Image (spheres, rainbow, N blue to C red):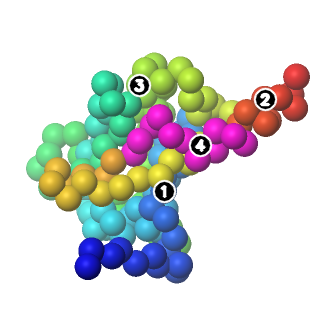
């Protein structure tokens, strides 16, 4: 049977995105395979961020695992977040970090972040209502 078992020690693979960059949960780091370098991409049509392991010779590589702290990895990259915000004005990364579930695409060998389904959207809407 094709069961996947939940590991309560590391939780769901998530990323948090804020105006300063992207933070990968312990589970997301594990699913990526703790790579030395990654590349960040954005699929405008499907509104997805993708993260793929690359080697040290890749021109646009970003150091990854050397930024690990307590199992989490944070990539500080304001320019990439601003680039994504240009195409997703409905998601506000400037007020606080927004969390997204991720999944690993085995065929493409990359972590996929679905930007159309933030986990915190209900919480953000409640905060906006209370600010009025």
Horizontal side of residue 16 vs 30, given as left or right: right
Tag 1 near tag 3, CB within 8 Å = no
Identify the residue shown where x is 43% and y is 20%.
87
Q: For this rendering, which residue is in front, 118 or 31?
A: 118
Packing grade of label 1 (10 A; few <14, some 14-19, many >=20) is many
Q: Position of residue 54 (x, y in %)?
A: 18, 53
Q: How far apart are marks 1 and 3 (CA)?
A: 20 Å
Among numbered discs 1 and 2, the one appearing first in the sequence? 1
Q: Residue 98 carries which label?
A: 4
Q: Name the residue under label 2.
A: 128
Q: What element carries label 2?
A: helix
Seen in the picture, residue 89 relative to 38 is either above or below; the reply is above
- The residue that mark 1 highlights is 14
Vertical placement of residue 21 versus 46, above or below = below
Query: Viewed as shown, does residue 83 lie left or right of 51?
Result: right
Asked whether the viewer can see residue 56, the reply is no
Q: Which of marks 1 and 3 is nearer the N terminus?
A: 1
The label number, if any, that marks residue 83 in the structure image: 3
Q: Residue furthest front?
A: 1
Element type at mark 4: strand
Q: Disc 3 vs disc 2: Cβ atoms closer than 8 Å?
A: no
Secondary element type, mark 3: helix
Q: Please provide percent x and percent y for residue 102.
A: 41, 53
Residue 115 within the segment the image draws in magenta:
yes
Question: Along the polypeptide, which appears first: circle 4 or circle 2?
Answer: 4
The answer to whether mark 1 and mark 2 are in CB contact below 8 A is no
Q: Distance between the residues labelled 3 and 2?
A: 24 Å
Give coordinates of residue 120: x percent, y percent. 64, 44
């Amino acid at each position: 049977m094709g069961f996947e078992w939940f590991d309560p020690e590391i939780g769901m693979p998530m990323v948090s995105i804020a105006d300063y960059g992207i933070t990968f949960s312990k589970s997301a780091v594990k699913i990526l395979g703790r790579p030395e370098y990654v590349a960040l991409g954005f699929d405008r049509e499907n509104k997805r961020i993708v993260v793929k392991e690359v080697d040290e010779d890749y021109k646009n590589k970003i150091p990854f695992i050397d930024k690990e702290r307590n199992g989490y990895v944070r990539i500080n990259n304001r320019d990439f977040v601003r680039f994504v915000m240009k195409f997703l004005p409905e998601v506000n990364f400037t007020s606080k970090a927004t969390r997204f579930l991720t999944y690993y695409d085995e065929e493409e060998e990359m972590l996929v972040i679905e930007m159309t389904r933030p986990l915190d959207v209900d919480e953000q809407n409640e905060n906006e209502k209370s600010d009025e």
